[in-house]
């Protein structure tokens, strides 16, 4: 199975790092729970253009993407995604397809370097790829995991299955998955029902 996995908001906790930088530079005290909209500039109370200019300056700073923390248990999540058992109890390997909307011109090297440092991805039995693509449904996968609720409509139109993980900015969306464990359980159940493989 090919499983498409977003990076920021699913694997890496970019929002908390951005907020730390934002609060120090703007004398504010926002926390991740305050970011109740995916368009981050809205809860911050600034214009889209201002935020995007600021954001570009931050992420292009050398080392910013290298130092992003993983969400708690993200490494175990990636390990669990790397294989499932079928209805007969046989272990079947999966391909983890990282798909990010980061701009490759400014982030490709640091993104790849950071992924190579994730210990579970160094295991020889874990197969993974990295794609830079805003239209993520165009990367061929069996299922996709993301935190962007604005992708739900285009994925639906493309007849692609998108699993939306619950974050403060997705809590208003019906059908989100509250944690990594629920995503694994959902996928494992489909495998055992022979929906894939």
Image (tube, rainbow, N blue to C red):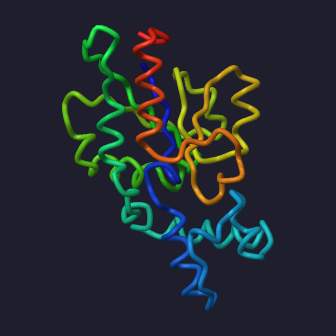
In the displayed structure, does residue 45 sit left or right of residue 53? Answer: right
Percent across and percent down for residue 47 are 80, 71
Above or below, 145 against 189 in this view is: below
Task: State the residue in front, 11 or 64.
Answer: 11
Extreme-right residue of the structure: 47
Above or below, 25 against 37 in this view is: below
Residue at image coords 44%, 23%: 2
Count of marks, rendered view: 0
User: In which quarter of the view is residue 165 placed?
Assistant: top right
Q: Quadrant of the N terminus?
A: top left
Percent across and percent down for residue 85 are 30, 18
Percent across and percent down for residue 59 are 53, 65
User: In which quarter of the view is residue 151 placed?
Assistant: top right
Above or below, 116 against 45 in this view is: above
Residue at image coords 71%, 75%: 44
Extreme-bottom residue of the structure: 27
User: In which quarter of the view is residue 137 placed?
Assistant: top right
Above or below, 49 against 95 in this view is: below
Task: State the residue in front, 72 or 139.
Answer: 72
Percent across and percent down for residue 136 are 61, 34
Extreme-left residue of the structure: 124
Residue at image coords 65%, 67%: 35
Task: State the residue in front, 100 or 56.
Answer: 100
In the displayed structure, does residue 92 sit left or right of residue 20? Answer: left
Residue at image coords 57%, 55%: 167
Q: Quadrant of the C terminus?
A: top left
């Amino acid at each position: 199975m090919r499983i498409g996995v977003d990076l920021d908001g699913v694997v890496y906790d970019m929002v908390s790092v951005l907020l730390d930088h934002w609060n120090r530079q703007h004398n504010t005290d926002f926390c991740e729970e305050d970011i109740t909209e995916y368009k981050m500039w809205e809860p911050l109370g600034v214009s889209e253009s201002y935020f995007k200019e600021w954001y570009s300056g931050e992420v292009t700073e050398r080392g910013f993407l290298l130092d992003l923390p993983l969400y708690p248990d993200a490494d175990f999540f990636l390990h669990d995604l790397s294989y499932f058992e079928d209805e007969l109890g046989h272990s079947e390997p999966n391909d983890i397809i990282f798909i990010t909307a980061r701009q490759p011109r400014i982030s490709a090297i640091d993104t790849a370097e950071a992924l190579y440092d994730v210990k579970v991805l160094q295991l020889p039995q874990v197969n993974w790829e990295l794609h830079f693509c805003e239209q993520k449904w165009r990367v061929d996968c069996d299922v996709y995991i993301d935190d962007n609720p604005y992708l739900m409509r285009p994925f639906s139109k493309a007849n692609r299955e998108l699993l939306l993980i619950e974050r403060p900015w997705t809590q208003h969306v019906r059908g989100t998955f509250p944690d990594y464990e629920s995503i694994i359980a959902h996928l494992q159940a489909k495998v055992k029902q022979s929906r894939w493989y």
